Image (cartoon, helix red, strand yellow):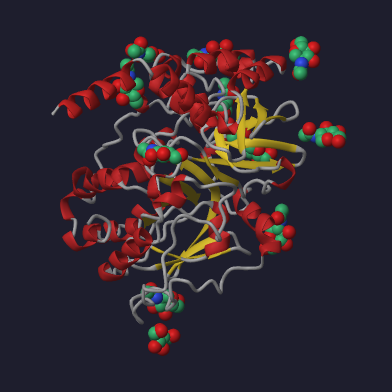
Amino acid sequence: MRFSITFSALLALATTSHSAFATQFQNLDLRQGGDVNSFLQGLRDNNLTALATVLQAHPTVTDRIFAENTEKLFLAPTNEAISKLPTWVTNNSSRLEATLLQHVLRGNFDAANLNAYPLHTIGHSLLNESAYSKLPGGAGQAVALAKSGNKTFVSEAVNNDTFVQSPVRFDTVTVQPISMAMTVPGTITETLRFMGYSEISTLIANVQNGALASTIDNMAGVTLFVPTNEAIRKYVGTFPNPTAIPTVLGQHIVASRVVYSPLLIDQGSMISSSGQDIVFDNAAGTVKVGNFTAKILQTDIIAQQGVIHQIDNVLASTALDVGRATQAQKSAEESIDDEAAQSFTGPVSGKNSITSQGTDVPAAQPGSGANNRSANDNSDTAGSGQTESAIGNGTNGNNGGASQAGSNNGSGVINGLNGNGSGIDHRQPNAAVSSKSGMGLVAAAVLASSLLAIAF
Ligand SMILES: *[C@@H]1O[C@H](CO)[C@@H](O)[C@H](O)[C@H]1NC(C)=O
Ligand SMILES: *[C@@H]1O[C@H](CO)[C@@H](O)[C@H](O)[C@H]1NC(C)=O
Ligand SMILES: *[C@@H]1O[C@H](CO)[C@@H](O)[C@H](O)[C@H]1NC(C)=O
Ligand SMILES: *[C@@H]1O[C@H](CO)[C@@H](O)[C@H](O)[C@H]1NC(C)=O
Ligand SMILES: *[C@@H]1O[C@H](CO)[C@@H](O)[C@H](O)[C@H]1NC(C)=O
Ligand SMILES: *[C@@H]1O[C@H](CO)[C@@H](O)[C@H](O)[C@H]1NC(C)=O
Ligand SMILES: *[C@@H]1O[C@H](CO)[C@@H](O)[C@H](O)[C@H]1NC(C)=O
Ligand SMILES: *[C@@H]1O[C@H](CO)[C@@H](O)[C@H](O)[C@H]1NC(C)=O
Ligand SMILES: *[C@@H]1O[C@H](CO)[C@@H](O)[C@H](O)[C@H]1NC(C)=O
Ligand SMILES: *[C@@H]1O[C@H](CO)[C@@H](O)[C@H](O)[C@H]1NC(C)=O
Ligand SMILES: *[C@@H]1O[C@H](CO)[C@@H](O)[C@H](O)[C@H]1NC(C)=O
C-alpha cells in the first residue's frame, strides 16, 4: 500500500515537474531531419521571407518536415506567390497547414530528370490528413512535376507553377522556389465542376440521384477518364439506352487504384468498374475499351481521391461483368501496404506504386465485348522510348477536342466563380456550382447491377 502511494507520487512528479525534459527530448526526436531555425534563416537569406514567416507561425508544419530523416523536396512559394494565396486558404489554419504540407514531397526530384510534359513525374507529399487527401493506404496527396524545353514546373490542372531561382539545400530538405503556390485539390466531383466538365458531372450526378457521385467522392483512390463535353454530347446524341449509361460510365472508372501518367506507361491495362479492360496504348496515347478508343488529351488532374485524365471520346462499351469488377477492386485494395503508402518516397513508378490489380483477376469473358486479356497483360504498351511524344501527340490536340484546362484565363474554366483566373488554382470547395440540370436521362432507369459494379 505504502509502496504504491510512493510510486504514484513519483509518477505524478515525473509527469509534472519533468515535463521540460520530456519536451526537450521530444524536440531532439523531431529534429532528426535537420534544424528548424537554420532552415527558416536560410529561407530568409534566399528571399523566401514570406514563407519563413508563415512557417514560423505554423510549427506543426516544420515539425512534420523535420520529423523524418529522409530527403525531401520543398516546393517553396516565393513572396509574391504567398501574397497571392487566397483568403480562404490563409484564414483557416488547418487548410493553410494542409496547403504547406502539400508543397513537401518525400524523395529526390532532380529537375533535370523530370518527365517531359504532358507526361509527369509524380511525387507524394506529406499531406495525408484524411480531410484533405483520400488516397489508398493513407498516402500523402500527389503532386505532378514536369519539364518542357528549359522550363520545369509544378503542373496543376490550370497552372504551371514554374521553378524559379536555383534550389538550395538545408540538411535533408532541398528548397525549390516556385512562382505560384498550389492549393489543396477538391473532391473528384468538385474538380470536375471546377474544370468545367459539366457533361460528365451531370451524368454522374444523375446515377441513382447522386449515389454514384458520393460513392466516388468517398473512395480512397480512384482513376477517372473524363470525355470532353463535346464527346459526351455526341454520345448522348446517339440516344443510347439510358439503362446502359451507368455501365458506360463504369468503363471510365478504375476503383481503389490511382493510375497517374507514369503508371499508365508502367502498368498498362486496368480493369474498369464495369469489369472490362481499359487498355492503354503508349504509342498512340490512347485508352481503349472493347471497340472504343479515346485519345488522352490531358493527364494527371489531381483530385482529393485520385486522378483524372481527360479523353476525347466516350468509351461506350456496354459490356458489364460485375463479378470481375468486384474482384478487380478487391485485388487493388489487397495490393495496398499502408505503411509503405504513408512513407512513400521518390517518383511514382510501376516498381513502387501503391496499388495494382493483380493476377488473381481472371481474363474477361470471351464474347463479353471486352478484350480477352489478363489483368497484367501489357502487350499493347510501346517501349518507353516513345512515351513522351506519344502522349504529346494526344495532348497537343491533334485529334480535336480542345483541352479546356489548357486555357489559363479563367473565363471558361472556372465557371466564372473565381474571378478572372488570378493565376492560382482556386479549388474552393464551397465554390462548386450544382450541375444538376434537366437531363434526367439516367436517374429514372438505373440497373441495380450496373451500380453494383461501382458501389459496393
Ligand atoms: C534577393 O532579392 C534581391 C532584390 O530583389 C536580389 O538582389 C538578390 O539577388 C536576391 N537574392 C537571392 C538569393 O535570390
Ligand atoms: C475566410 O474567407 C472566406 C472568403 O475568402 C470567408 O467566406 C470565410 O468566412 C472566412 N473564414 C473565416 C474563418 O474567417
Ligand atoms: C477550415 O477548413 C476545414 C477544411 O475545409 C474545415 O473543415 C474547417 O471547418 C475550417 N475551419 C474554419 C475555422 O473555418
Ligand atoms: C500521415 O503520415 C504519417 C507518417 O508520415 C503517419 O504517422 C500518420 O499517421 C499519417 N496520418 C494519417 C491520417 O494517415
Ligand atoms: C531556354 O534557354 C535558352 C538559353 O539556354 C534561352 O535562349 C531561351 O530563351 C530559353 N527558353 C525559355 C522558354 O525560357
Ligand atoms: C504548361 O506548360 C506546358 C509546356 O510548356 C504547356 O503546354 C501547357 O499549356 C502549360 N499549361 C498551362 C496551364 O499553362
Ligand atoms: C467490335 O467491332 C467488330 C468489327 O467492327 C464487330 O464485329 C464486333 O461485333 C464489335 N464488338 C462489339 C462488342 O461491339
Ligand atoms: C480468352 O481467354 C481465355 C482464357 O484465358 C482463353 O481460353 C480463350 O481461348 C481466349 N479467347 C480468345 C478468343 O482469345
Ligand atoms: C506524333 O505521332 C507520330 C506517330 O503517330 C510521330 O511520328 C510523331 O513524331 C509524333 N509527334 C510528336 C510531336 O510527338
Ligand atoms: C479568355 O480565353 C478565351 C478563349 O481562349 C478568349 O476568347 C477570351 O478573350 C479570353 N479572355 C481574356 C480576358 O483574356
Ligand atoms: C483580375 O486580374 C487582374 C490582373 O490580372 C487582377 O489585378 C485582378 O485582381 C483580378 N480580379 C479578380 C476578381 O480576380
Q: Is residue 146 above or below residue 432?
A: below
Nearer the observer, 372 or 231: 372
Residue 51: give x, y in percent of width and height: 58, 17
The quarter holding residue 18 reads: top left
Q: Going by the picture, which residue comes out furthest to the front? A: 2
| Residue at position x 44%, y 20% in the image | 21
Nearer the observer, 381 or 445: 381
Residue 442: give x, y in percent of width and height: 23, 51
Q: Quadrant of ligand 3?
A: top left
Q: Is any part of residue 358 visible from this angle?
A: yes
Tell me the quadrant of the picture where the C terminus can be found: bottom left
Nearer the observer, 172 or 116: 172
Residue 69: give x, y in percent of width and height: 58, 38
Left or right of residue 345, residue 435 in this image: left
Left or right of residue 108, residue 289 in this image: left
| Residue at position x 50%, y 56% in the image | 353
Q: Is residue 257 above or below residue 371?
A: above
Nearer the observer, 165 or 42: 42
Left or right of residue 162, residue 361 in this image: left
Q: Is any part of residue 303 visible from this angle?
A: no
Q: Going by the picture, which residue comes out furthest to the left? A: 1
**In the rendered picture of this protein, how many numbered marks are placed on residues?**
0
| Residue at position x 45%, y 36% in the image | 195
Tell me the quadrant of the picture where the N terminus can be found: top left
Q: Is residue 58 above or below residue 188?
A: above
Residue 310: give x, y in percent of width and height: 49, 48
